[in-house]
Image (spheres, rainbow, N blue to C red):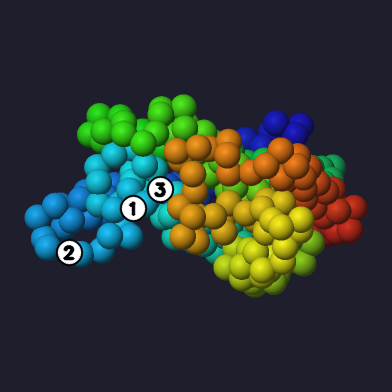
């Protein structure tokens, strides 16, 4: 019975303008990132622009580092923020429009409906990201020089961005189910993306920035001057940071949906 609910949610996403937008958004972000990399390359090559900082971090060059770094920057900014806003009412809009009434009266639990919406939304959005990353990967390996990074580091970066998106989608869907209001979850998650990483970065633990011990560190690394280390992916974190970061990621990613299921109940009604 759960498979039928899941299939219904996938079908609903494929028919909604919002669902289609969420699916194609990563491809749009990828195209913008590619165009920006190419334009910046030609500007730095043929126009007398004296910005040594760009050259130092790899921008202005048509190579693996600049290509992947630009994709990460666009994904963290435009891609993530737009996805959060658009996914922020996926549950509450259906509840408000009484779309859960028939399934509830048919014997399905609100827990099943929520889990189906969470799983379908995650797979739908991450599937769109994989398509966008495939386009980016083909562009990078065909047109960019491999100086400064390896293919496995590109793939590791894609995985990191996918895990980051899955984390925030999990949070926004869960908060939407708990509050039944889209703006609350959107505001909270946007604060976690825009403000919280910088606040945590000001706190030090054992000489290290506290943000590096949290799942919010990816946003901070990419949005700051660090331009995360495509050159040394596994050197981003210390062993302790990897362990605590992973544990915190799983705790939030699993604990928040569990809390949503236990704290928010919807009864069948006419």
Which residue does the numbered mark 3 point to in the structure image? 69
Q: Position of residue 171 (x, y in %)?
A: 70, 55
Q: Is residue 5 visible?
A: no
Quadrant where the N terminus is found in the figure: top right
Identify the mark nearer the N-term, 2 or 3: 2
Foreground: 35 or 9?
A: 35
Q: Position of residue 117 (x, y in %)?
A: 68, 46
Judged from the image, the secondary structure of the residue bearing numbered disc 1 is helix
Q: Identify the residue at image location x=61%, y=67%.
A: 198
Q: Identify the residue at image location x=29%, y=53%.
A: 55
Q: Identify the residue at image location x=52%, y=33%.
A: 156
Q: How packed is label 2: few (under 14 Cα within 10 Å), some, or many (20 or more)? A: few
**Label 1 near label 3: C-beta < 8 Å?**
no
Which residue does the numbered mark 1 point to in the structure image? 56
Judged from the image, the secondary structure of the residue bearing numbered disc 3 is helix
58 on left or right of 87: left
Judged from the image, the secondary structure of the residue bearing numbered disc 2 is loop
- Closer to the observer: label 2 or label 3? 2
90 on left or right of 253: left
**Label 2 near label 1: C-beta < 8 Å?**
no
């Amino acid at each position: 019975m759960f498979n039928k609910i899941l299939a219904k949610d996938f079908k609903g996403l494929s028919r909604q303008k919002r669902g289609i937008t969420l699916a194609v958004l990563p491809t749009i972000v990828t195209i913008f990132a590619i165009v920006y990399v190419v334009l910046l390359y030609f500007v730095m090559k043929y126009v007398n622009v004296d910005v040594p900082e760009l050259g130092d971090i790899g921008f202005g060059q048509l190579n693996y580092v600049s290509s992947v770094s630009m994709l990460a920057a666009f994904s963290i900014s435009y891609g993530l923020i737009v996805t959060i806003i658009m996914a922020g009412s996926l549950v509450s809009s259906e509840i408000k429009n009484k779309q859960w009434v028939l399934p509830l009266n048919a014997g399905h639990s609100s827990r099943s409906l929520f889990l189906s919406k969470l799983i379908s939304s995650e797979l739908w959005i991450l599937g769109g990201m994989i398509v966008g990353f495939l386009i980016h990967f083909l562009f990078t390996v065909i047109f960019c020089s491999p100086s400064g990074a390896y293919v496995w580091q590109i793939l590791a970066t894609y995985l990191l961005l996918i895990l980051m998106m899955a984390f925030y989608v999990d949070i926004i869907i869960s908060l939407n189910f708990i509050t039944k209001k889209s703006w609350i979850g959107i505001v909270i998650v946007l604060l976690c993306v825009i403000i919280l990483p910088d606040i945590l970065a000001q706190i030090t633990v054992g000489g290290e920035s506290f943000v590096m011990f949290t799942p919010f560190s990816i946003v901070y690394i990419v949005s700051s001057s660090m331009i995360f280390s495509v050159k040394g992916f596994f050197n981003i974190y210390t062993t302790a940071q990897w362990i605590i970061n992973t544990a915190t990621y799983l705790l939030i990613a699993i604990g928040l949906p569990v809390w949503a299921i236990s704290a928010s109940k919807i009864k069948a009604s006419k």
